[in-house]
Image: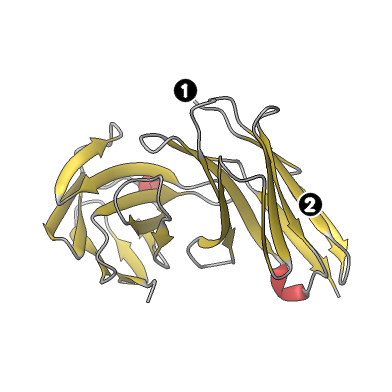
Amino acid sequence: DTEVTQTPKHLVMGMTNKKSLKCEQHMGHRAMYWYKQKAKKPPELMFVYSYEKLSINESVPSRFSPECPNSSLLNLHLHALQPEDSALYLCASSLRDRSFEQYFGPGTRLTVT
Amino acid sequence: GENVEQHPSTLSVQEGDSAVIKCTYSDSASNYFPWYKQELGKGPQLIIDIRSNVGEKKDQRIAVTLNKTAKHFSLHITETQPEDSAVYFCAASTGNQFYFGTGTSLTVIP
């Protein structure tokens, strides 16, 4: 099973809302990632969790707050977003680091109004 | 840092023809090169990968070749089918660093 699941599939939120994106994998992977993808562009790395600890934060604004409750779950908490944050948010996982195969979830399509 | 260039940005082929997408990288420490296929509205799907100790890898209609000396690698799709239509991304990884190419939009014309 190489499945990474993400919920919700679509999300529309106002700039004052607080919402969370969820990601889950049961492959025993110890590295999990959040990416942001704009139309017709490659995914951009936001955060990396390694063994449930945040190891990379690519200078992401504090209105995005990641959380890794356990080795199978990854959350992205959203607060006070801007319209330019509208994008496809992808979760991925790999066995240890990015020298191993990364498996992506289907993404959450986020629209900020 | 690494720089991964991908060409062409768009590619149209007739069904049954072959498609080739090429990527070049700059960091000689890169040792893992995956290829992803992304269909509209979906996440990227790993379709094939190659490591720096191998020159070629094949999986049915898909093959990847790697030239470490020239620092380039290519994706070859033979006998293309309409369901191969998607955006394809190459990537290069050193383990600590991971860089995507800019993507190729492939259209297979029935």
- The residue to which callout 2 is attached is B20
Q: Please state which of residues B70 and A33 is positioned toward the viewer in this rendering.
A: B70
| Neighbour tally class for label 1: few under 14, some 14-19, many 20 plus, Cα within 10 Å | few
| x and y, in percent, of residue A26 in the image | 25, 72
| N-term mark: 1 or 2 | 1
Q: Residue furthest front?
A: B53
Specify whether disc 1 shares its chain with disc 2: yes
- Disc 2 marks which amino acid? Val
Indicate how the structure is coloured in the image.
secondary structure
The dot on residue A57 is: none
**Residue A110: quarter of image:** bottom left
Quadrant of the image occupied by residue B19: bottom right
Three-letter code for the amino acid on which mark 1 is drawn? Gly
Q: Mark 2 lies on which chain?
A: B
Q: Is residue B94 above or below residue B18?
A: above
Task: For marks 1 and 2, give the CA distance.
Answer: 26 Å
Query: Residue B83 lies in what quarter of the image?
Result: bottom right
Residue to which mark 1 is pinned: B1
